[in-house]
Structure formats: C-alpha cells, structure tokens
Amino acid sequence: MTDIGTILKEARKEKGLTLDDLQQTTKIQKRYLIAIEDGDFAALPGKFYVRAFIKQYAETVGIDPEELLAKLDEDKAPKLEETEATTRTEAVKREEEKTMSPILAGLIRYLPTIIIVSIVVAILGTIYIFAWGDRDRNSSTQIADNSQKVSVSSESSAKSSSSKEKASSSESSSSTSKKESSSTKAKKESKKTTKQKITNTSAAGSAFVYDLENAPATNKIEMTVSDGATAWNAVSANGVQVWQGTLNAANTSQTVEIPENTTTITLNLGNSKATSIKINGKKFDFLKENETLTVRTITLNVAQTTAQ
C-alpha cells in the first residue's frame, strides 16, 4: 500500500504543494496526509475515511482517484488468497482422516487427551492414599485435644458472645451508612466528569475554534433556523463534507449524525444570527463570541469520554 502513498506524494511535489498547502485545500489534518503518504492507513480513523481521504487527495493533485482505489482493493486481495489456501489445507486433512478407519482415527485424535487424563488420575490417587493415611493417624490425637479445649473455650465464649454481638451490630450499621455515602458521592463525581463541555479556544475574524470535551463516540448536530429566516449551512467531519443545505420556512431544522470516532467537526454558517445549534441535545451558545457576525466558521476539536 506504500505505492499509493508514493504516487500521491510525487504528484504533490510535481504540483509544488507542501503538506500544509494540501491541508489548507482539502481540510484533511496534516497527520492523516503523512499517514497516507507512508501507507499507514491504520492511523486513519476508519475504513470510510481511508477511501474518502485518498479520493480527495488524488483529485487535488490531479490523479484519477478510481485507479488508486482499485489499486487499494488489489493490495487487499493477497489476504483473501491466503485464507483460501488455509481452507484448502484443512480440506486435505479432513479427506485424509476419512480414508482411515473410524476407530483408528478416533484413537489418534484423542490419544493426547487420554494420556493426560491418565496421568492426572494417577497423581490424584496417590495424593488421596497418603492423605487418608495421615487422617487415620491424627484422628485419635485430635479427639483427646478437642475434649480438653471444649471445656475451656465454652466458658470464655459465653462471656464474650454478648459483647461481640453488640459491637458487630454497631459496626454493621456504621459500615452500611459509609457505603451508601461513598456510593452517592461516586455517582455525583461520575456525572460531573462525564458532562459534555464546550470551550472556546481561539477566535480570528469569522473563524472560531472550540474544544468539545466528554463527547460520545457518535455525535449529533441539530441546526434550526428562526421563523421567516433563510440560512445556508454545511457540516464536515475530519475535513470531509457530510451535509450541506439551506434551512428556510419549508425546512426549518436539520439533524446530522457525525461518523463514529470523528476528531474534528467543522460548521459553516451562512446566517449565524438566525441559526441555533444543539450538540448531542445540548444547546450550543456560539453567539456569545461576537453576536454581530452573520457568516462564521466553527471548528470543534472532539475529545471523547474515556470513562463512563
């Protein structure tokens, strides 16, 4: 698969483009562009993005993307041939077993198991014989010792039993209240740590960057336009556009489901003053950062929840 990355890299250099230029044009993060050129497709966020990023890279540097995608599929073909070879080998083994006598084949198949079971049974039998002999020798001695201990322990146990019961009762109630308190505290702390949080990290002109913390693996963006207004909007995931359209009186709302494990979400708003946004059902108050702007670009850097 490194051939694909080499082809794209050489085409980029022929165009006189740097990785930074390509990132600006395609909106694909630079680390993903480097991974594509190195053939490290496992570093990309998923199979969907492997094909999408290769196609977008190829179109930008003037290469037919279909040829590269076909080559990507061909590189995966040897794995299928190896699987077929393994299947054929297993079929030959089964055919050889059929030619044997059923009884002989069964003995050969289970011979290792029979040997192991025999050894284990022999060991357990030996241990049992020695243990039973020790038990007989020690039983008479233990009876004499126990008769002496019973008379002494019965008196002391009678005295201490009442005090132990009282202490046990108080300790039990105290332990229960502590467990309930710690459980309630843990639940409250868990809710605090997993609560979704959006923080503005930079603002330059009409471009705003936010950190989306404690996000789920799959995020939902809901955009609604106010009554009588019209707004063109677009949504991209990791540099790939997943939806664009116009919201108006006939179509006032649109919900976009972002692909799983997306790390960057970009929102292009054509009429931000008339548009309201919810992220995973929570209102996103983006107008507090310069509410006078009409057109704006919002970038969300997604940090998913690591502990539920």
Image (cartoon, helix red, strand yellow):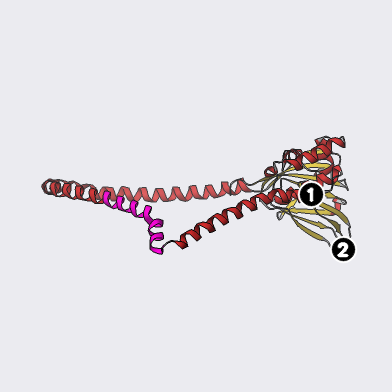
Q: Amino acid at mark 1?
A: Val
- Give the magenta range: 101-123
Which percent across, then down, holds residue 156?
A: 18, 46
Front residue of 164/189: it is 189
* Comes first in the chain, label 1 or label 2: 1
Which percent across, then down, holds residue 274?
A: 85, 54
Which SS class for mark 1? strand
Question: Which of the two marks, 1 or 2, is nearer to us in this view?
Answer: 1
Residue 258 on the magenta span: no
Q: Quadrant of residue 201?
A: top right
Which SS class for mark 2? loop
Q: Is residue 72 left or right of residue 139?
A: right
4 is higher (above) or lower (below) than 230? above
Q: Quadrant of residue 100?
A: bottom left
Q: Residue furthest front?
A: 99
Please tell me which residue is depicted at 46% across the width and 62% down the height of the picture: 99
Front residue of 92/147: it is 92
Residue 266 appears in the rendering: no
Front residue of 210/293: it is 210
Count residues near mark 2 (Cα–Cα under 10 Å), then give few for <14, some for 14-19, many for 20+.
few
Read off the residue under disc 1.
240
Residue 117 on the magenta span: yes
Which percent across, then down, holds residue 260?
A: 69, 52
Which percent across, then down, holds residue 75?
A: 70, 48
Task: Determine the CA span between mark 1 and mark 2.
Answer: 28 Å
Q: Is residue 204 left or right of residue 74?
A: right
Residue 38, numbered label: none
Read off the residue under disc 2.
249
Please say if the residues under marks 1 and 2 sit with CB atoms less than 8 Å apart. Answer: no
Please tell me which residue is depicted at 61% across the width and 45% down the height of the picture: 306
